[in-house]
Amino acid sequence: HAQPRATSAAPTASPRVVSRGHRVARVVRRAPGATTSANTTVVFPRGTVAPAALRATPAVPAMKSRRACVTTHAGYGSYDGRGGGVVPIPDRIVALLPYLVPLLDALRYSRFFFSQFPQAIVLLTPLQPIASMYFRIPFAGLISFFAIYMGMAENRTLSRFVRFNAMQAIILDICLVLPGMVEYVFSPGRLSGLGFELYRLCYNSVWLFVLFAFALAAIGCLSGQTYRLPFIGEAADTRV
């Protein structure tokens, strides 16, 4: 085998032209304590295999001096049940709107409450224009129900914060069907004495529960936090 010829070239020297019949390997050597490297070009004849020490090795990326900083951002659309992320103002308002439907549907259970406490009617003054339009449109409750369910609760383009509150409002509205069915089955008619007191207590309980749920949802939505209603919140969470 022919012996390889080693030539030393300065780092600034012009590139050497080698014929096609030779194999070229470049080795970078650094003397101890030196700040520059010396380039050595070794030329092998054709058919000669370069030693393993002189073969080209893949470049290894240099390690950064600082550890990479991984930033995780929990956006408002990735609600995880722990209140992570910042909810934009438009989403807070949109998430509150579905709760108007169960509040308006529960007004029929408020007649005894406002007859006992007429001063409390002031609380519903801002809702009078919405209530008058809601009860004037035929099948407004059914239309609103499907609009919230299809357009908000099942709309994956919206944030989970909005979808969760929409689903919770829908389930709350469905729960209002139960006292209506009980009233229809038993048909209390004219009541007096203890029966009337029990009947009025049931009406007031339903109304106060829905009013409390709406107030809690309003505080949560406007503050960008998710409040789960008892039992209803867990059901809404599993659906979303």
Image (cartoon, grey):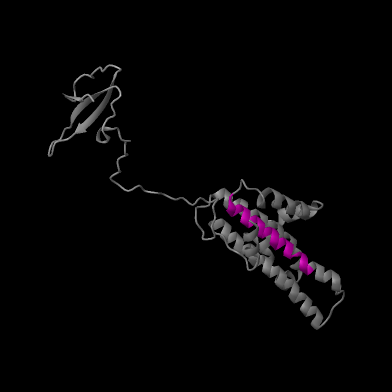
Question: For the point 69% across and 65% down, which residue is it?
Answer: 121
Q: Is residue 168 visible?
A: yes
Q: From the viewer's perspective, is residue 61 above or below residue 197?
A: above
- Quarter of the image where one finds residue 234: bottom right
Residues rendered magenta in the picture: 159-179
Pick whichever, 89 or 67, lies toward us.
67
Q: Is residue 79 left or right of residue 154?
A: left
Q: Quadrant of residue 55?
A: top left
Q: Quadrant of residue 189?
A: bottom right
Residue farthest along the left direction in this orientation:
33
Q: Is residue 190 above or below residue 37?
A: below
The picture places residue 36, in percent across and down from the top left corner, at: 16, 32
Is 170 part of what is drawn in magenta?
Answer: yes
Q: Write the residue at 81% across / 83% down.
A: 193
Q: Quadrant of the N terminus?
A: top left
Q: Position of residue 172 (x, y in %)?
A: 69, 63
The C terminus, quarter of image: bottom right
Q: Nearer the viewer, residue 180 or 200?
A: 180
Residue placed furthest toward the bottom: 194
- Compared to residue 12, the image places residue 88 above or below, namely below
Pinpoint residue 197: horizontal percent, then vertical percent.
Answer: 77, 79
Q: Quick check: 7 above or below 84?
A: above
Q: Is residue 175 magenta?
A: yes
**Residue 119 visible in image:** no
Magenta part mainly helix, strand or loop?
Answer: helix
